[in-house]
Amino acid sequence: MSDNTKGRIHSFQSLGTVDGPGIRFVAFLQGCPLRCSCCHNPDTWEFGAGTEYTATEVVSRAIRYKSYFGSDGGITLSGGEPLMQSEFCLEIFRLCHKEGINTCLDTSGCILDESTKKLLSETDRVLLDIKYTDEDGYRKFVGNTTLSDTLDFLAYLDSKSVPTTIRQVIITGINDSEESIRKLSEISKAHKCVDKIELLPFRKICKVKYDNMKREFPFASIPEPSPELMQRLNSILGN
Ligand code: SF4
C-alpha cells in the first residue's frame, strides 16, 4: 500500500455539518453491497462507477479546508459503504493523521475483517448506523447484513475504545416505536464506547434519484416522521 492507493468516490462535500463532530470535509465513497429500503444515496450503490482518486488527492482536497475544522472537525468518509474500500480509506486516514486532521468513518458495520480492523486503528470516531433493533427489520428492509453483524462490529469498537455515535434513520410505522428506541438505548448503554445516539428523520427528497435510475423507491409511500414524533423519540433518549 502507498499514498498512491486508489479508490472510487461518488462525490465530496466541502464543509459538512451533519456527518460527525464540527465542520467536516466529507467524501462519499462509491459502492455499497446493502440495499436499504430507506437509502437516500442509491446512486452510490454501483461498484466501478464514480471517479477514481488517489489517497493523496483526497487528502489534498481536505487540507484546503483545514482552517475551518477547528478543534472538533476533520474528514468523514461516508458512502456508499467505505468498508468496501478499506485499504483506500486506511491510507486516507493515515495521511490525514500526518496532517493533524481528525478522522471519522460513517458505516453500516457490515464487514469486520483484518483490513477493517487496521482502518479502525486510524479512526478517531465511528458513526455506526444501527438500522433496526431486530433481525426482522434487517431481513426485510436491508439485506446482505444482519443486526448480529452490526452488534459484532459494535462489540469490536467497544473492545478498542473507539468513540462511537450510533445513528438510526427513523421511518414512520417501522422503527418509530418507543420499544424500538428503548432497545437502541439499551444497546448504547451496554457499550462504553458509545457517547451519542442520533435519530435522523427519514426523508424522501431522494425519490428523484430513484426516478432517474428507473428504480422503484421502496418507501415512496411512507410519510416522513413529524417533528413532534422525532422530539418524543429523542426525549426517550434524553436528547
Ligand atoms: S448502507 Fe447506506 S448507502 Fe448502502 S444501501 Fe444502506 S443507506 Fe444506502
Image: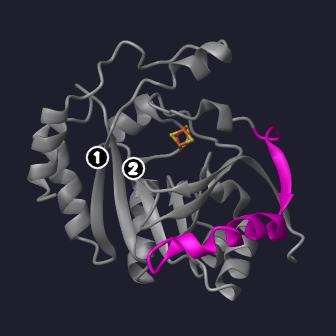
Marks 1 and 2, Cα distance to the nearest angstrom?
Answer: 7 Å
Instruction: Please provide percent x and percent y for residue 165.
Output: 36, 64
**Residue 194: x %, y % from top left:** 31, 71
- Residue 117 versus residue 138 in the image, above or below: below
What residue is rendered at 29% in x and 43% in y?
134
Q: Which residue occupies the foreground of this view, 84 or 28? A: 28
Does 79 sit left or right of 94 as displayed? left
Q: Is residue 184 magenta?
A: no
Mark number displayed over residue 181 = none
Range of magenta residues: 47-73
The type of residue carrying mark 2 is Leu
Which quadrant of the figure contains the N terminus?
bottom right
Please give the label number shown on residue 147.
Answer: 2
**Quadrant for the C terminus in the image:** bottom left
Closer-to-camera residue (31/230): 230
How many marks do you count on the picture?
A: 2
- Contact between marks 1 and 2 (CB within 8 A): the answer is yes
The quadrant holding residue 163 is: bottom left
Colour theme: one colour
In this view, 165 is above or below 207 = below
Q: Residue at x 20, y 35 (%)?
A: 176
* For marks 1 and 2 on the same chain, the one whose residue lies earlier in the sequence: 1
Question: Label 1: which residue?
Answer: 133
**In the shown orientation, is residue 236 left or right of residue 213?**
left
Whereabouts is ligand 1, in terms of quadrant?
top right
Q: For the point 50% across and 52% down, which residue is it? A: 108
The answer to whether 199 is drawn above or below residue 157 in the figure is above
**Residue at figure coordinates x 18%, y 61% from the top left:** 186
Q: Nearer the viewer, residue 67 or 144?
A: 67
Residue 232: % across, % down = 10, 42
Q: What amino acid type is highlighted by mark number 1?
A: Thr
